[in-house]
Amino acid sequence: MINKAIYYLLIIGLLTSCGNSNSETKVEESEVVENSTNKVLLSSEVVWEKLNPARGKQSPQAGTIWGDRKGKGAGSIATGFLAKFIDGFSSPPHIHNVTYRAVVIEGMVHNDDPDAENMWMSQGSFWTQPLGESHITSAQGEQIIALVEIDKGPYLVEPSSEAFDSGETPVNIEASNVVWLDNKITNWIDDQSEAEISFLQESNTTNLKSLFVKLPSGYTGTIGTNGTVVHSVVIKGELNYKLPEHNEVKILDEGSYFGSTDKAIHNISNHGKDEAVIYMRTDGKIAVK
């Protein structure tokens, strides 16, 4: 587990590299984006299958959102999928062949060393699990769903007897400890916007970064992106998303996805009574207006 003081230091470092970028690198809303690559996948369109078929009925369910979790076909590519657990689920100690990042969407999740006391993470919590490290995952709630993300497939479950030290440190950030930044601190948010951002993690070897974007009730605006990788999942709340081709509006509930593969403008509104939170993974920059 990473403590709150260390998390603040991580945020400061990410601010230096992300939040205070020069204004000319930002994506402008006024730009016309031709040949849009915007795409949407509703949570109701996700196809579910066993995450670990070897466990039979005890296996959690998995629904791929992007990429290839099994590492077949196109080969080893970045993947995001939803994992669904039953109330009371608890895995045996195990390891994975790849490091993953995860966000709780519904219910409560515990993920830690086999001998650790339960530390339940609620909706909007973020954690990472290094490859090779023995751990257990437990879940409780009427419905438990988490977003799981890997940089390349396949995603495998292997016995803890094969554990090894990859040198990576796990991160557990409960939702109540997430540090939010407004437009006074990061220029990724327009001066007139009440949105907030939390920079979660940035790769040491690539430009890929993970962040939360919080949109208040009543928000209507855009998120401009210029990355060749843009994956976004609704973690909390419900959003209206307008597709640029025909101005078709899609209702994105929790677990729904939108993304793009080039410079794009994402038209979004939050008509709900509560704030909405989006998880984003990108190699570019964003501009929230």
Image (cartoon, helix red, strand yellow):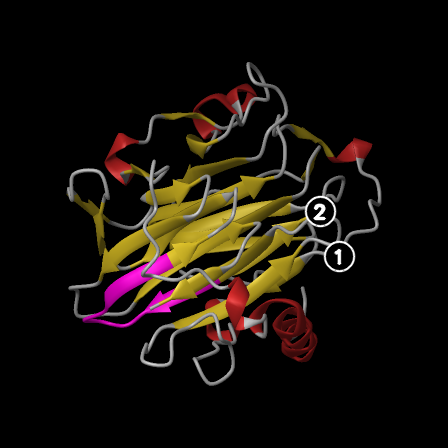
Vertical order, 50 against 273 (above or below): above
- In the drawing, what numbered circle is on residue 169? 1
Residue located 65% across and 77% down the image: 12
- Answer whether residue 159 is visible to the viewer in this image: yes
**Magenta stretch containing residue 222, yes or no?**
yes
Vertical order, 241 against 171 (above or below): above
Residue located 42% across and 73% down the image: 189
In the visual, does 37 lie left or right of 285?
left
The kind of residue tagged 2 is Pro
Q: How many numbered callouts?
A: 2
Tell me if mark 1 has few (under 14), some (14-19) or many (20+) residues whose alpha carbon lies within 10 angstroms of its own: few
Residue located 52% across and 58% down the image: 285
**CA–CA distance between discs 2 and 1?**
7 Å
Query: Magenta part of the protein: which range?
Result: 212-223
The kind of residue tagged 1 is Thr
| Residue holding disc 2 | 130
In the visual, does 93 lie left or right of 236?
right
